[in-house]
Image (cartoon, rainbow, N blue to C red):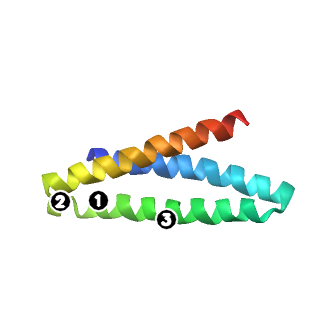
Amino acid sequence: MEFPVILELINVALLLFLLSVYIQNYRQMKSTFCSGLIVFAFLLLLQNIFAAYFHFVQLDFYTAEAMQHAILVSGAQTAGLLALAWVTWRE
């Protein structure tokens, strides 16, 4: 399995965690901000699921340059989601 796929699967796990927290917060507070976070996390989750699927299925068609780009984008996203999950978990 290629490194971008691993990063995207880590992103899926982080987004599932964040989504569960956002849904729990929405049930308690009923705020539009929480509903916005739910929509944002859900759409980002779909993007990561699709990206992991296409990377896995079409692995033979990716060039080295495309893989470097995928690693940079997925890595930056993983770093951001890790920071967000850490802050969310602490609160």
Q: Residue 89 carries which label?
A: none
Q: Mark 2 — residue? A: 62
For label 2, the SS is loop
Spot occupied by residue 78 in the image (x, y as percentages of width and height): 44, 44
Q: Where is residue 19 in the image (x, y as percent from the top left)?
A: 64, 55
Farthest-out residue, top: 90
User: Is residue 6 depicted above or below 49 in this figure?
Assistant: above
User: Disc 2 to disc 3, how far (Cα)?
Assistant: 21 Å
Q: Residue at the location (69% across, 33% down)?
A: 90
Of the numbered discs 1 and 2, the one sitting upstream in the chain is 1
* Residue at position x 52%, y 48% in the image: 13
User: Is any part of residue 82 visible from this angle?
Assistant: yes
Residue topped by disc 1: 55
Dots 1, 2 in contact, CB < 8 A? yes
Q: Which residue type does callout 1 highlight?
A: His
Mark 1 nearby-residue class (10 Å; few <14, some 14–19, many ≥20): many
Q: Distance between the residues labelled 1 and 2?
A: 8 Å
Picture quadrant where residue 58 is located: bottom left
Q: Is 60 or 31 nearer to us in this picture?
A: 31
Q: Which residue is drawn at 60% across and 36% down?
A: 86
| Frontmost residue, 13 versus 32 | 32
Location of the C terminus (image quadrant): top right
The quadrant holding residue 84 is: top right
Neighbor class of circle 2 (other Cα within 10 Å; few <14, some 14-19, many 20+) is few
Which residue, given by chain and number where applicable, does mark 3 sit on? 46
- Of residues 86 and 5, which is closer to you in this image? 86
In the image, taking residue 29 as reference, residue 1 lies left or right, namely left
Answer above or below: position of 5 versus 61: above
Query: Which residue sits at x=78%, y=58%?
Result: 26
Mark 1 and mark 3: span between their CA atoms? Answer: 14 Å
Check disc 3 and report its element: helix, strand or loop: helix
Q: Is residue 5 left or right of 19 when viewed as pictured?
A: left
